[in-house]
Image: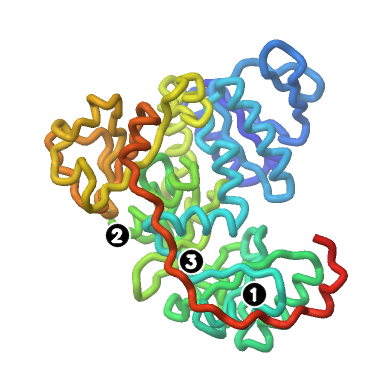
Amino acid sequence: MKLAILSRAPGAYSTQRLVAAAQDRDHEVRVFNTLRFAIDLAGDEPDLQYRGKPISDYDAVLPRIGASITFFGMAVVRQFEQMDVYTPNTAHGIANSRDKLRSIQILSRHDIGIPATTFVRDRADVLAAIDRVGGAPVVIKLLEGTQGIGVILAPDTRVAEAVIETLQSARQNVLIQRFIAESKGRDIRALVVGDRVVGAMRRTAIGDEFRSNVHRGGSAQAIEIDADYERVAVQAAQIMGLRVAGVDMLESKDGPLVMEVNSSPGLEGIEGSTGLDIAGAIVDYISSQVNFPELDIRQRLTVSTGYGVSEIHVKEGADVLGKAINDSGLRERDIVILTLTKGTKVIPNPRGDRVLAVDDRLLCFGKLESMKELIPARRRRRAQPKVQPLPEDPLHEHEEV
């Protein structure tokens, strides 16, 4: 395999370990400075120039893109994708995970526990937002930040208001999250590769610090996580669109709560605490995918006019309810079930004798018109009680819309 690693820090521990792991397995590997690429769209096929010269063919690319170059880095990764070079972390997946609000919005759509979170822009809405997440103390987070930077614990409402107002005046967008007191300055980092957790550690904050990041002096201890935590970690990474990810979870009284999904997880802390060859697991996974990669269906299926992918939610009164898949009539309607989700269990390529029940979710590929007929009418949100309109804010009187 010929592997390209995108990194601006060739001397960093993670980059060196990945290079060594690839070389130990007799793969050809090269580290590229992401910022030295030029995206070439002038020819007949998508191409990349590196330091002014065309790059040779690569089988796979592993992005290690820092937050400061997210936009350009994603463009480079996307170009590799257009050139049919396999990557475990697509540009779409990196974009999902890099924006904290976007990632939480995506996870909230699925059966993934997250801390109660709210996002507001107007300072007049801050107090109500704090109440919605359970009141002070609250955690305030910048939308983009790594290694614990931009994460603040506000002990009371007045401090929270002041911090949020200060950050917003500096044109910073912030999230307000419930403080999970029972986590006691600890969290779990699970390293997901493909569809499994290859290593996990518990990070503990030092002293009065509530952020447990190793870069902030926290300690790390290898742990064996239970099946529920592993399921949540793998699902969170896959929902983001990542096949190599660090998933950070809090240990709450209600089970795992996902804080963040990191598309460029550091390897030093987790390899040091677990003694495992995490870099080797990543390289092995990429090598296994090169000749049989997963396809981005959003780009590939547009050529099939009238066909696509959709999710069918089995409700009361549905035609398919209580029937085995073979007897459901779906195949006769030109619909193929890719996965069947029952509660938290995802069943790929389900057998034809499985009986469909209420609240099953079917991820299907087939004729769009046929699938539309099976999707129930959109559920309307319950009407909210009317409230008296607030007086106009005089500061906004002259604001153009």
x and y, in percent, of residue 332 in the image: 23, 24
Q: Do the residues labelled 3 and 1 touch (CB within 8 Å)?
A: no
Q: Is residue 351 visible?
A: no
x and y, in percent, of residue 342 in the image: 24, 50
Q: Residue drawn 58% across and 54% down?
A: 102
* Residue to which mark 2 is pinned: 226
Q: How far apart are marks 3 and 2 (CA)?
A: 16 Å
Q: Is residue 45 visible?
A: yes
Q: Which amino acid does label 2 sit on?
A: Asp
Element assignment for label 3: strand
Identify the disc placed on residue 152: 1
Whichever of labels 1 and 2 marks the residue nearer the N terminus, that label is: 1
Element assignment for label 1: strand
Tell me the crowding category of disc 3: few under 14, some 14 to 19, or many 20 or more residues within 10 angstroms, Cα based.
Answer: many
* Residue to which mark 3 is pinned: 203
Tell me the crowding category of disc 1: few under 14, some 14 to 19, or many 20 or more residues within 10 angstroms, Cα based.
Answer: some
Quadrant in the rendering for residue 238: top left
Image quarter hosting the C terminus? bottom right
Quadrant in the rendering for residue 39: top right
Q: Which amino acid does label 3 sit on?
A: Arg
Q: In this view, does 296 lie to the left or right of 395?
A: left
Whichever of labels 3 and 1 marks the residue nearer the N terminus, that label is: 1
Q: Compare residues 172 and 33 and report the one nearer the observer.
A: 172
